[in-house]
Amino acid sequence: MSPGISAKFASLGLVVLLAGCAATAPQYYSLQAPAMAAAPQAGEITADYVISVQPVLIPEQLARPQIVVAAASGSEVMPLNAALWAGPLEAQIRDSLADSMARRLNVLDVGLSKVVELPTWRIYVDVQRFDSVYGEAVRHDVVWRLVPQNMPEDVGKRVCSAQLLHSVGTGMSALVEGHRRSLDTLAAVMAQTLPLGSTLPPLSEAQQEGLHFRGCVVQDAGQA
């Protein structure tokens, strides 16, 4: 590690982790909290459609087992050999968003299954930024596409975008919890852009803090 990078990351309290010299075994972290994973649907499924959240796109430098942290200033990033994701990051993001949206809307997420006989919203998520600034903040820049299948001809595609910035406390658990909270807020926003979304409760003040929903562009069904 170069002296310049070491000095910038030393203030984060991660010198041991960044050097890969942790004496203990690596710690594994999940974006899906146990309580959330076990939560049932909020009520009976009443929607006349299902959702199909597709594999999520993430920046190439994040497609690795290690959690990647950034310095508060500068462009340096560093993978942490002692702090690993419990599974592929893109799959964890997909599962977290799908679970949260399905619970909020009381719809089924059929994943990658091809349920050709049911009206389906296929949801494509492009995570353009997934920043982890240790002890300070997490940031997400996300674009998602909603593509209708087996729907009336007048139902068009939608492309939406949001940015989220949430402060976090010190420690890897606090950092990962910040990502969880941010993804849960993102799922709430995404749910509101789907049918029945207008009937959902408004976001809380805590969820709105640090959220910038940029809106949606609706493509007419007749457009290519």
Image: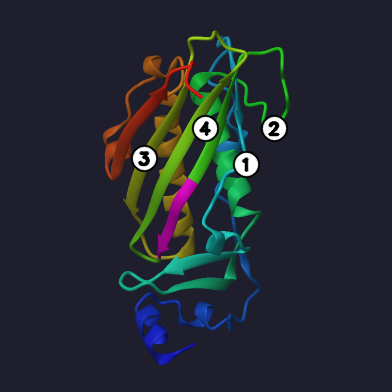
What residue is drawn where x is 63% and y is 76%?
24
Q: Is residue 198 visible?
A: yes
Vertical order, 190 against 200 (above or below): below
Residue placed under numbered mark 1 in the picture: 55
Identify the magenta region: 127-133
In front of the other: 37 or 84? 84
Q: Residues within 10 Å of mark 3 (few under 14, many from 20)?
A: some
Q: Residues within 10 Å of mark 1 (few under 14, many from 20)?
A: some
Marks 3 and 2: CB-CB under 8 Å? no
Q: Is residue 131 magenta?
A: yes
What residue is drawn where x is 66% and y is 73%?
25
Label 2 to label 1: alpha-carbon separation: 8 Å
Residue placed under numbered mark 3 in the picture: 162
Instruction: Point out the tag, 3 or 2, that comes first from the N-terminus.
Output: 2
Residue found at the far bottom of this picture? 3
Disc 2 residue type?
Leu
Marks 4 and 2: CB-CB under 8 Å? no
Vertical order, 177 against 184 (above or below): below
Marks 2 and 1: CB-CB under 8 Å? yes
Residue placed under numbered mark 4 in the picture: 100
